[in-house]
Image (cartoon, rainbow, N blue to C red):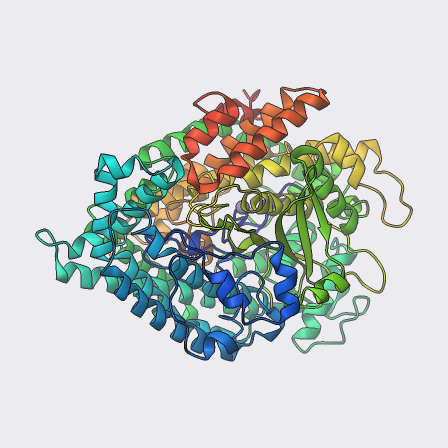
Amino acid sequence: MLRSFTSSAASRLRATRLTTGVSSSTTATRAFSRSNVASHARSRTTSATSTTTLSLASRSLATRPLTIRRALATITDIKGATATYPKTNPEFTTNPILNWHTFPDFAAIKAEHVVPAVEILTKQIEATFQERSKRMTPTWEGTMGLTQDLEDDLERASGVISHFSRVKDSPEFRKAVEAIQPMIVTISLKMGQSLELYDALVKLADNKETWSTLDKEQKRIVQKAIQGMRLSGVAFGLPGDGNAEKQKRFNEIQGKLAQLSLTFSNNLQDETKAFAKVITDRKELEGCPESLMKAMAKNAQSRGHGDGNSETGPWAVTLDYPTYIPFMMNCKNRDLREHAYRAMVSRASKGEKNNEPVIDEILSLRQEEAGLLGFSSYGALSLSKKMASDVGTAKDILDRLYEATLPAAKKDLAELTEFAKDHLGHPTPLCPWDTPFVEEEYSKDRFKYSADQISEYLPYSRVMDTLFEVARDSFGIDVTEMSAGDQSKAGLTTWNKDVKIYQVKDDASKKVLAYFYGDFYSRSEEKLSGAWMDVCVTRMKDPVSGAVRVPIAYLVCNQPPPLSGAESLMKFQDVTTMFHEFGHGLQHMLTTVDYPQASGIKGVEWDFVEVASQFMENFAYEDKWLSRMAKHHKTGEPMPQEMKETVKKSKQCLAGMAMLRQLHFAMLDLELHTQYKPNSGETIFDVNRRQAKKTTLVTPIPEDRFLCGFGHIFGGGYAAGYYSYKFSELYSADAYAAFEEQGASVEGRKRIGRKYRDTVLAYGGATDPKEVWKEFRGRDGVEVDALLRHSGLLSSP
Ligand SMILES: [Zn+2]
């Protein structure tokens, strides 16, 4: 799952983290988008199909070395499968993308395995699905029971590939991913448009007698499956009201959209990599902190300039966020900032890698897809799957926040402008390339500490220990890193020597609940920037033997690797990012749902899935935890009180402007997906400018084409869904308010923590989010004031 997007450079400590894009999600397509960083399962979620029967474990475990089988026996050992299919092709036993059930053998996976794995798997799945279609019946076993293993196999294989494409990128891997894209789309469509399955599901839901045999979770899974199949175009094939022409066109659109999203992301990544402004005179970089100078010297070296010496240079300003953001915040050289800014907002917007026509085609195909399915716009289609349920509700929420935010944002800008004039002698009015810099100076002046100074007190290992302590204290779980010895005894491998494996246990019973892989250090040559959580396997329980396969997650971020024995230091915004991703991880790992179709983050509504993550961020600001994690990396001295106050207050500093920026993206996204008509005379950039009149205070420059880099909505799954960040945040703030209401009561907080674990974290996608909310919070609605209060926007005039 991704963090929200910050275009004109995030600002100060609290800047929301970058990120590129997210996964694509319709039930029909399981497109890979490389910048598909998000993953809260969406890309590989609930395809309309699914089911019981977990035969896979016993089958594929049989082919792994004995040591692994023994090690895993305690946590999986799933037997008693009711549906299996023959895997006679040797690839199933020799190809590491296919030959695993719980822990992939990451060390063995290479680009050359991708195409044969997907070719063989999709062929086998198609044949099996076709054969099983003949015996589908309106029962749980006769529908979900016949598709679950197929879905799981497909998800695990495509999940590993998509994970590798983000952490082990190479030209060979990219090519392989492009080659398998159509195969994945085709098989997903075939299953999503199966008339036999659809017919059986609808009959199951319509028949009172059979329906009453299902439990509540199964009912929701079936209903969601039916909805998913409708959105996958199953109705085009129905006798009577079917339409073969429409179906053909719909399927074409799915294939094209998957391809276009990949093109969008590749163009963006190539263009981001292509820009480098090499500087040889250190004076031009005045203001840049040492850590940034080091990174820029490395950037220059990797582009063939100099030897990476940060004292003598040269240095290269680049557009990857870890460089660009601190550069825009700190560099005093206004011309240079302008140069970088202009490059940033024109990425992938001209020449061969121009994303404008790609975006127009995407928007026009999405509109056509929505029309084919009977929706008035793509926005209406997208919202029909979400908690907000219609465009009007999403817009209302955004409007309410906008009303509360605008006066505060205006006040923020006025203050900044005055500060720039009086304290910095800086020209005004401020331009877009000035605001991050002036915001940082303002923040330093107000709080006396820079982000870099604060990071001296945030050594990576202490932050992680504290995060796990929060989890123990609040939710009763125990997180331990597996030793190298234990890993090798269990036969577990990773994709890089720095990747760690963690075991998550219930603190009271010591029962193993989950595992996760932690890939924390940046490797710019092969790993995407940003931070994300993704799914390796989902929890499932064998209905016959009762054996459970525990969930496994990936937690990925881009900390600078520690240099020669020194600790890697974290910026506070990276700390909150880590808490955020871990929050997603907890929802995936602490699920108690037995059905893989809806366990963990799978099947959670897109606009509710950011609740668990944003909720976790709150703990990083709590005095208790901040004091625990913040110790000087060299002296071990606790963080001075004033600095802690800085960190805590930073959340509210210039919060109006920050909120307005997110509202701009969210409203623009909805506008593009409900009102915009490609080729109607108005361009996407015109729409941005039109929207900007309402939602930006520093007018975008005429050349602003940032939309060509808006990966969330064009390279990932946030199309007509960017509002989800704010929508979820309303809930996460209100959820955290439940803790605040307990005041200093340790018992009270523990009780709420347990309740949170037993509802929001446990129910996954198997319960309607409105019910989950009601059970946790004890009331229906969400209180908007909690978010406004946390952001310091309540008292604004
Ligand atoms: Zn997230």
Q: Is residue 384 visible?
A: yes
Of residues 774 and 732, the one nearer the viewer is: 774
Measured as percent of width and height from the top left, residue 403 is found at 45, 27
The image shows a total of numbered marks equal to: 0
Does residue 326 appear to the left or right of 267 in the view shown?
right
Residue placed most toward the observer, 395 or 225:
225
> In the rendered image, which quarter contains the C terminus?
top right
Q: Is residue 464 left or right of residue 83?
A: right
* Res. 255 image quadrant: bottom left
Task: Report the residue that reaches farthest toward the right.
Answer: 635
Q: Position of residue 739 (x, y in %)?
A: 63, 25
Residue 32, can we see it? no
Name the residue located 45 percent from the left edge and 74 percent from the top edge: 117
Measured along the vertical axis of the image, is residue 185 above or below residue 385?
below
- Residue 326 lies left or right of residue 634; in this view the side is left
Q: Can you give x and y, in whole percent of width and height, for residue 247 in the image?
A: 18, 60
Q: Which residue is pictured at 38% across the width and 49% down the height?
A: 719
Quadrant housing residue 490: bottom right
Q: Position of residue 432 (x, y in %)?
A: 55, 48
46 lies above or below 118:
above
Q: Does 727 appear above or below 22?
A: above
Q: Quadrant of residue 658?
A: top right
Identity of the residue drawn at 29% across and 42% down: 380
Q: Nearer the viewer, residue 632 or 604?
A: 604
